[in-house]
Amino acid sequence: MTILRFNKLALSVALMMSCATAFGQKPTTKDEPVSAGGDQGVTDTWKPSIEVDGAYDKVKHIGAPIPWQTIREADVLWKKRVWREIDTREKQNLAFRYTGDEATGGGMFIEILIDAVKKGKVAAYSTYDDRFTSKLTKEQLMEQITPKSDTIEVEDPVTGQKYQKVVTRDFNPQTITKYRIKEEWIFDRNQGKMVVRILGIAPVRDIYDENNIYRASMPMFWLYYPKIRQTLSEYEVYNPNNEVYRATWDEFFESRQFSSRVTKVSNALDQRFEDIYGTDPRGKMEALYESQQNAQEIFNKEHDMWVY
């Protein structure tokens, strides 16, 4: 009887290990912490937990990008290129500002992108180069990531003499408040539906002067989105409703779980709405109205293609 029980236990353990292997997951024990992206996080300061930080056994989640179905040019009946802006301060986009844990790589979304660029997983392109024609060198990239050193005048509390001191500031991920997205909306008659493909993504940083007064916002760099999808599939997105079920960043973008507004559509003068209507209060309202109108037109286009 004892041998029979032992055999059943051994068979159960073998089945669990084979299932974990079949799904590309490594079995873990209570003494082995699990984190996304390996033992090293996306920031230099983050460290994985030495103890298992959780009430149940976890397995490492192996992510993969959602496959894109090939689109033939002969099947494209309609296409529109669209630029959007994601404001991370909106409630629906707060996942972009989550500071990170084991499942999310230990950093914010911007830190995942910067880590991928530093490790050579994807190339970074110039600030306003959404056509991906000019790659940034390592020195140019570090200028975008690391703020420039400032020289300030400091008074010695003992002697009262004043002297110049060089102050070095670290990169603050909280200054990344927006992301720009370049995408194409395509009606594919083979699939019989509207298909959207993200082509590029650019983090936008807020710039402050020495008095900590906001001056402007500008993109840091552009990334070619199809080449970063594998990296995005390795990290999960914080889910405030249920932390068990978390989508990867690739699933997050593909399922359009973010909130955004249209800032530009392909036009003859290649202008953004704010370039056309201005940045004064009335111009901003006109640009917002134009954004909503264009978004609605694209939404209705799929229905219009089926009306004969």
Image (cartoon, grey):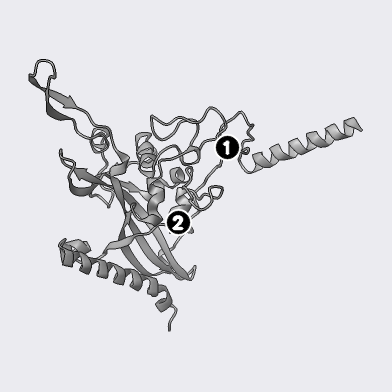
Report helix, strand or loop for mark 2. helix
What's the mark number on residue 296?
A: none
Query: Residue 211 location, x and y as percent?
Result: 15, 40
**Residue at the image position 69 percent from the left and 37 percent from the top:** 17
Q: Which residue is mark 2?
A: 254
As drawn, 183 above or below 221: below
Residue 101 locus on image (x, y percent): 47, 38
Q: Residue at x 33, y 41 (%)?
A: 123
Q: Position of residue 45 (x, y in %)?
A: 39, 29
Image-based side of 27 in relation to 51, left or right: right
Q: Quadrant of the N terminus?
A: top right
Q: Residue at x 44, y 78 (%)?
A: 306
Circle 1 is placed at which residue position? Answer: 54
Q: Quadrant of residue 154?
A: top left
The foreground one among 252 and 186 is 252
- Between 193 and 28, the residue placed more toward the observer is 28
Viewer-side residue, 221 vs 212: 212
Q: Residue at x 63, y 44 (%)?
A: 23
Task: Name the amino acid type tagged 1.
Answer: Gly
